[in-house]
Amino acid sequence: MDSLNAMNKKICVLNDKKTITNVFWTGGWDSTYMLIKLLKQNKTVQPIYVIDNGRASRNNEMLAMAEILKHLENLGGEVLPIVQININEIKENEEISNSYKNLCKKVRLGSQYDWIARLALEYPGIAMGIEKPNGEFSGCLAAIEKTGKLIFKDGVGFIDVNHSSQDCINIFGNVCFPIIELTETDMVKDIKEWGLEKVMKNIWFCHAPINGIPCGTCRPCQQKMECKMNFLLPPKSQLRYKIFHLIERTIGKSSAKLYSKFIHSHYFHFFHYN
């Protein structure tokens, strides 16, 4: 319990007399923007990448991060070598897992928040790339709104341990949120002002790529199109997105989901590429 109550720590920790900012990095838009912002603040950043062999986009994410790293040298700060942790090696913690289950009774919360909270015990204060929604649902923010409260310091969000439930503290108390007051639209504006559009074209966000490119129909792909970030998707992906939404508008959501399932199927790949 003592370790769980040692929450709400600063974003930085000390290591070998150097101030290190630990961050969860996936090679996606939010976490890459967060990493760039920290570098521009002259921070020394330690990226943490969690390896999940069951994640279809894992190889794409790792390739994206390797390519992005080539373009970060002149931003200021320093990026340390990526620490890779296998999801199966994250220590179990019954109290955290029970808190996750309790929160799931109140809101729809992704399964990753269980292992994120358990891993954050090893990296207290680790930064997480959760942005302000553009109207879409955010399980993380919904859980915090229902069971806790955020406080802010220098634009970084932390769980207020004095006004949050123990379940909320257990799941979110060891992470901080540097971009939680920014929407993706805000971030696009910054990236353009910084002249880093070419760097961001290397990010990976699709959950279910088709032949190595974004599918255009998973929720992250849809969000990028909805936020006028279509420059991140190649023409084929944009076309699939448009077809998906045409079906959704004219026939219905169930038919659109069937279309998405079909284009991800081996049957589609066989006839489309042979």
Image (cartoon, rainbow, N blue to C red):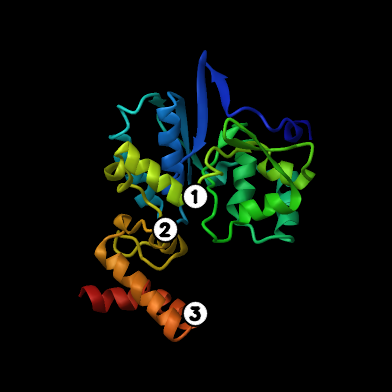
Depicted 147 relative to depicted 23: above or below: below
Between circles 2 and 3, the one closer to the viewer is: 2
Mark 2 or mark 1: whose residue is earlier in sequence? 1
Residue shown at the point (42%, 58%) measured from the top left: 227
Q: Residue 151, located in which quarter of the rendered image?
A: top right
Amino acid type, callout 3: Lys
Picture coordinates of residue 251, whole percent (x, y): 45, 86
Picture coordinates of residue 271, whole percent (x, y): 25, 79
Q: Does the rendering let one see residue 156?
A: yes
Q: Nearer the viewer, residue 7 or 146?
A: 146
Mark 1: secondary structure: loop
Name the image quarter holding the C terminus: bottom left
Mark 2: secondary structure: loop
Amino acid type, callout 2: Cys
Residue shown at the point (51%, 24%) measured from the top left: 20
Q: Residue 135, located in which quarter of the rendered image?
A: bottom right
Q: Nearer the viewer, residue 266 or 252?
A: 252
Q: Distance between the residues labelled 2 and 3?
A: 21 Å
Give the labeled residue for mark 1.
183
Q: Residue 90, located in which quarter of the rendered image?
A: top right
Mark 3 or mark 1: whose residue is earlier in sequence? 1
Q: How far apart are marks 2 and 1 (CA)?
A: 9 Å
Give the labeled residue for mark 3.
253
Mark 3: secondary structure: helix
Give the labeled residue for mark 2.
227
Mark 2 or mark 3: whose residue is earlier in sequence? 2
